């Protein structure tokens, strides 16, 4: 699976988050939201060899992965990158989609479609649009599962963990045994 490097500079030009829902995408009445699970390798820190970045909810109740409305003037990848930049202040390599989930909004009582991508973080910004509204925290997969408030995001995290474990196994199998004789 080849990862695509998408420049966030082409997606976001300011420190202001998009607001309003006039450009929001809907499918059969379901609002479409996109987001990322930002991650980094930790070289032995943490039980999984990597950490994920979670952010506080806008309402301050619990933690989650960055996500928001997919807008009609952007691709799904651009939307995921924009939301991750706006809410978490990170940039990196966007990898193939983890999946699609249908869930009900707790606050609006309506159905949503959520699409999640892994983002291998290459840069953590000091300033980003929602810095004053959100906290961000790197944590282990176990910690993220415990504090993430959405079941569908926990499922996306499980898909990411399985994918990364499979990639690691493939890397190890390609190396094979080494002999000097």
Image (spheres, helix red, strand yellow):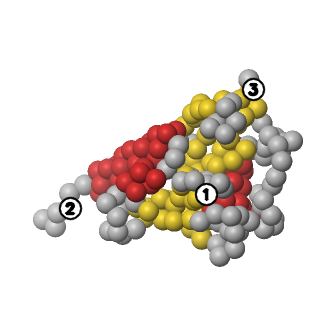
Q: From the viewer's side, name the closer residue of 143 and 167.
A: 143
Q: Secondary structure at mark 2?
A: loop
Cα separation, mark 2 vs mark 1, equals 53 Å
- Answer yes or no: is residue 113 visible: no
Q: Is residue 4 left or right of residue 45?
A: right
x and y percent of residue 131 in the render?
A: 68, 68
Q: Is residue 12 left or right of residue 117?
A: right
x and y percent of residue 174 in the render?
A: 32, 52
Residue annotated with mark 3 = 29
Camera-nearest label, 3 or 2: 3
Q: Quadrant where the C terminus lies? A: bottom left
- Answer yes or no: is residue 181 visible: yes
- Residue placed farthest to the top in the image? 28
Quadrant of residue 103 in the image?
top right
Camera-nearest label, 3 or 1: 1
Residue annotated with mark 1 = 60
């Amino acid at each position: 699976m080849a990862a695509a490097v998408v420049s966030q500079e082409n997606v976001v030009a300011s420190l202001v988050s998009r607001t309003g829902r006039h450009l929001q995408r809907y499918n059969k009445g379901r609002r479409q939201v996109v987001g990322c699970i930002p991650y980094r390798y930790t070289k032995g820190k943490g039980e999984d060899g990597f950490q994920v970045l979670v952010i506080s909810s806008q309402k301050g109740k619990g933690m989650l992965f960055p996500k928001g409305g997919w807008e009609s003037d952007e691709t799904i990848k651009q939307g995921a990158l924009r939301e991750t930049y706006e809410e978490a202040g990170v940039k990196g390599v966007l990898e193939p989609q983890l999946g699609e989930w249908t869930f009900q909004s707790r606050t609006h009582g309506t159905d949503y479609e959520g699409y999640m991508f892994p983002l291998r973080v290459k840069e953590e910004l000091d300033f980003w649009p929602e810095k004053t509204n959100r906290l961000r925290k790197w944590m282990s997969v176990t910690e993220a599962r415990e504090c993430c408030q959405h079941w569908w995001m926990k499922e996306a995290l499980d898909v990411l963990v399985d994918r990364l474990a499979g990639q690691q196994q493939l890397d190890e199998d390609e190396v094979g045994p080494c002999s000097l004789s």
